[in-house]
Amino acid sequence: MAGNSFGRIFKITTFGESHGPAIGVVIDGVPPCLPLTEADIQFELDKRRPGQSSITTQRNEPDSVEILSGVFEKQTTGTPIALLIRNKDQRSTDYSDIKDTFRPGHADYTYMQKYGIRDWRGGGRASGRETASRVAAGAVAKIILRKYNINIIAYTRAIAGIYAQKIDYSVIEKNDVRCPDMDAAELMKQRIKEAQENKDSVGGIIEAVVHGCPAGLGEPVFDKLDALLAHALLSIGAVKGIEFGAGFHAAEMTGAKHNDKMYVDGDKIRTVTNNAGGILGGISNGEDIVLRLAVKPTASISQSQQTTTTSMKDTSIEIKGRHDPCICPRIVAVVEAMIAITLADCLMIHRAKSILP
């Protein structure tokens, strides 16, 4: 398997390279008669596109999406949907001086070891630019989820050790770092600018909450919902860790403290706390799904770094070009997309099991 596809019923396959003519995605399994226009997809892409502020890469990509198939008269037809995003502002010459040098923190060396060839123009297939295709597919998945009143909200919880102390969803799109705490957002932005001035980068933590997910999604043993979400989210290049609910803090708790006490609320069973993060035994329990991701510092920095050449010689490298000093503000949209794709797939599998009495 080539590893370019994800999902079982709602299945996506992305294609294209960072500095090629275009990137895109083919989505199979989308139900017919869903309303879908390019504007629906563009809304999500605009949250991920480069050049949004002084603390993101200044690569000027409009990320305009084109629907090539699967939609007729503003409705899905049930056939594969092909979405194309043309690359407009790639500068391959920024990489020509280092095409024979492995960049620390990048996939240059591992791609060469795997394939014996690599696209050195911005990282090719390993570039974060590939995630625009995921966001486009996630926009379609969100339309399905909205039919079931499932809503996903992701935001920057921390950057460079500065944590949001308040959670106010209404301000997430009102600051450059997509943080739910305006005071913390300003401190985060200052820390990112300090890293820029030092030719460095910083990482952070993204938190995501899924409201309205029904109980019963996810499969026993190997296809647990949290396992599938972990697969989806850890496939994002900059993500290096994941936790659900209490997460790693659970290791410090007792069972009496960690167990979520249950009670009857009308026609539903609820929990007093949510240390499980909305998933028990790999199956959603109807509470909010809560997860957090560790996002590494951007690998492309302009400091001099020790490395090697493709001909096995020690050397040093200074990476030029246009890069994010912190990927957190733009990765928020990618996180939401991958959660949406996973939940749409799980929802369709769950409903398929209910077609017979």
Image: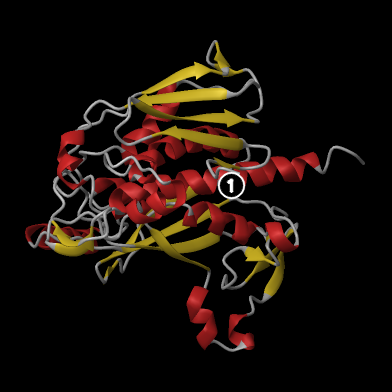
- Residue 48, given in percent of the width and then of the height, sits at 33, 40
Q: Nearer the viewer, residue 138 or 68?
A: 68
- Residue 318, given in percent of the width and then of the height, sits at 13, 55
Identify the residue shown where x is 76% and y is 41%. Answer: 351
The N terminus lies in quadrant: top right
Work out which residue is located at the far left of the displayed protein and give it. 197
Look at the picture and state if 10 lies above or below 293. Answer: above
Position of 290 compared to 199: left or right?
right
Work out which residue is located at the far right of the displayed protein and give it. 357
Label 1 packing within 10 angstroms: few (<14), some (14-19), many (20+): many
- Residue 236, given in percent of the width and then of the height, sits at 43, 51
Q: Nearer the viewer, residue 176 or 272?
A: 176
- Residue to which mark 1 is pinned: 342
The C terminus lies in quadrant: top right
Residue 187, visible in the rendered structure: no
Identify the residue shown where x is 63% and y is 86%. Answer: 255
Identify the residue shown where x is 55% and y is 45%. Answer: 3
